Image (spheres, rainbow, N blue to C red):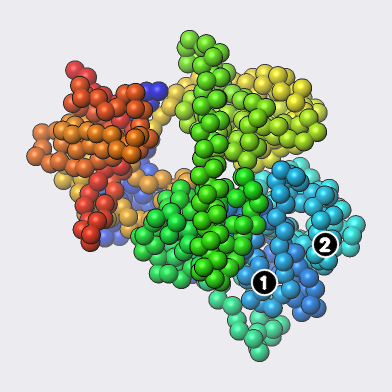
Amino acid sequence: MHKQIINRPVALEQCQFSAGISPLMARIYSARGIFNNDALNKQLTNLLDYHLLKDIDTAARLLANGIMQKQRILIVGDFDCDGATSSTLGVLALRAMGAQVDYLVPNRFEYGYGLTPAIVHVTHNYQPDILVTVDNGISSIDGVRAAKARGLKVIITDHHLAGQALPEADAIVNPNQPECLFPAKNTAGVGIIFYVMCALRAELKTRGWFDNRPLPNMAHYLDLVALGTVADVVSLDQNNRILVFQGLARIRAGHCRPGIKALVDIARRDITRLNASDLGFALGPRLNAAGRLDDMSIGIELLLTESANQARTLAAELDSLNEERKAIEASMQREAISALESLEFNHHQSLPWGLCLYKDDWHQGVIGILAARIKDRLNRPVIAFAEGDNEELKGSARSIPGLHMRDALDSIATENPGLISKFGGHAMAAGLSLKAPDLPRFETAFDNKVRELIDEADLNAKIPTDGTLSAEQITLETALCIREGEPWGQHFPEPVFQGQFQITQQKLVGQKHLKMVLQVPNEQTWIDAIAFNIDTAQWPNPSVTTIEAVYKLDINEFQGQQNLQLMVDYLHPVTG
């Protein structure tokens, strides 16, 4: 699909940077809504005050009472990377404060999502006094009611959007609940439990609990916060950027969990140069593979272990699961593309605006990734379905800019009572369940709703860039300057540029990557470049001498030498 390359809007007139910020970096920061040095401060002292989180003081008092009264605390987690890091952080921090604590992660295929009544029944095996949810619970009305009926205290820590009714928990810590004044609404689940543990430490300290025992250093858990935050693809607002920056700094210095070191090793990354992209694309998927195909407790045990040997064994197990996940996903993607082609749509516009995909043997744990891949390929909202229990279909939805997926599902549910069994999520990703016979009716409702909420122009794929670079700016020094601006990530994207280049060499490497040597037009400057996962039916193409490229400035480090390399995200031939 040919994509439109557009420039990100900038507002240089609002910039008030001090000396030391280059005009190029000022332009880049301005396009991301940052106009002064204060917004770039990534020190821990600039973190938002946890007292702004509604109910956090109540949660801290309940947990402090539980610890001092030797009550049993059970963490009920979620089955993705955010859930795994949240569960691990909660267990480690509570143990460090003297708590009796265990964890339980529901098997997604057996129990579904969140604190359900069925999971509350399973918690009886642990004999808890207090349940603490991490990265889930805001929609668990029936589950909380079941827990309260058993006489349990329930503390919910979550970041997902709240529905019209809230569970009747003893405390709910979620920045996205009504009347919560905490401004960082994009904080991941691991960030929320981190804040709760900070509040608990402060509460215990005022009670003299640490007079005769070590005071835990909360910075020790920032490696987990960084990993979970990036892997959950939440917006990197300033507060999240501080958490990720500080966590990455600890990981690079080797001050991290043995399990994180093992994941870095098996992903063949250099820990001293690890960046946010590595957390999102190398470490996160390996942890997520456990929850997608097996049992996320493998991932949590990896993060909990103090043994380097056990960490290596568990990391290898996760790596194997991730390879299996990739094979399943590739097969499902081929089937989905084949199904779309078999519909014989002659024009791109003939496709439904809101696309639903389903096959009865698709794996429930991989439909989210499939929906994302097809969404990227066709640039329209996609929901992929797989079979659940009791003739239900489980759907995983991915959206495009301009369509708030959870709100769209909410609107469909309101207009079609009983059509959707349950749903939840965010603007760009959501999950839902419906009865299998209702899929055709839902497909129509979804397509109609998408057509109602967006314009046809929204379906045209656009690539936002930070403009062009002069030949003098395409340098290693510029790449190093951009690296210093890390972490880059969701809604704070790594800078990408556009420009025309002449291809002097091109060849396929690794069967699907295009290795090139590019010349800056009218300059005696040649640069190594690589484009990953290209269409091998189109490239390499010896007849193409000039390309329009969208690229990042990358640093290739080999045998102690640093060289500039372009990472090409998109390219197409320039004719005429």
Depth check: 113 or 62 in front? Answer: 113
Residue 410 seen in the figure: no
Tell me: residue 323, above or below residue 299.
above
**Would you say 43 lies left or right of 529 here?**
right
Q: Secondary structure at mark 2?
A: helix
Residue 129 seen in the figure: yes
Dot 2 amino acid type: Asn
Disc 1 designates what residue?
94
- Mark positioned earlier in the residue sequence (1 or 2): 1
Depth check: 181 or 500 in front? Answer: 500
**Would you say 444 lies left or right of 305 here?**
right
Q: Residue at x 55, y 25 (%)?
A: 336
Q: Residue at x 45, y 51 (%)?
A: 282
From the top left corner, tell me how far across and down residue 273 is, in percent. 35, 60
**Would you say 172 lies left or right of 562 here?**
right
From the top left corner, tell me how far across and down residue 29 is, in percent. 36, 49
* Quadrant in which the C terminus is drawn: top left
